[in-house]
Amino acid sequence: MYQYYLADIGDNKQKLIRGMPSDWLSFAVYEPEQEDWDQKFGTFWADKILVSDFSDYDEISEKEAIRFIKVH
């Protein structure tokens, strides 16, 4: 089951990230322009959220993630 994260990346911009904490290769970033999940930087975000001291993100529900996708 995926967990969803909303990361603040500066300039009032946010990234929606999903992944399974036990599988770093499952992490992906939602790209609104493509209306799809991109895994290119998935492991970067897995490391940033799960290991590093990055704290500018919130864990959100799947329902909130769907709402974010609909708005963007």
Image: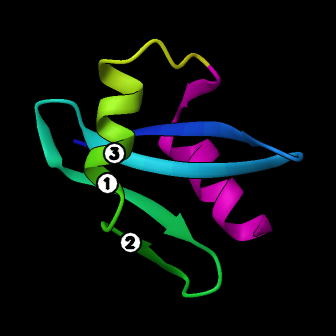
Name which of mark 3 and mark 2 comes first in the sequence: 2
Amino acid on which the number 1 mark rests in the picture: Gly
Give the percent coordinates (x, y) of residue 8.
Answer: 71, 37
- Which secondary structure lies at badge 1? helix
Residue sitting farthest toward the top: 53
Label 3 vs label 2, nearer the camera: 3
Quadrant placement of the C terminus: bottom right
Closer to us: 47 or 64: 47
Give the percent coordinates (x, y) of residue 6.
Answer: 60, 39
Look at mark 1 in the image and give the residue it sits on.
42
Q: In the drawing, does residue 34 fall left or right of residue 10? A: left
Q: In the drawing, does residue 32 fall left or right of residue 46? A: right
27 within the magenta span: no
Q: Are marks 1 and 3 in contact (CB under 8 Å)?
A: yes
Magenta-drawn segment: 56-72
Amino acid on which the number 2 mark rests in the picture: Asp
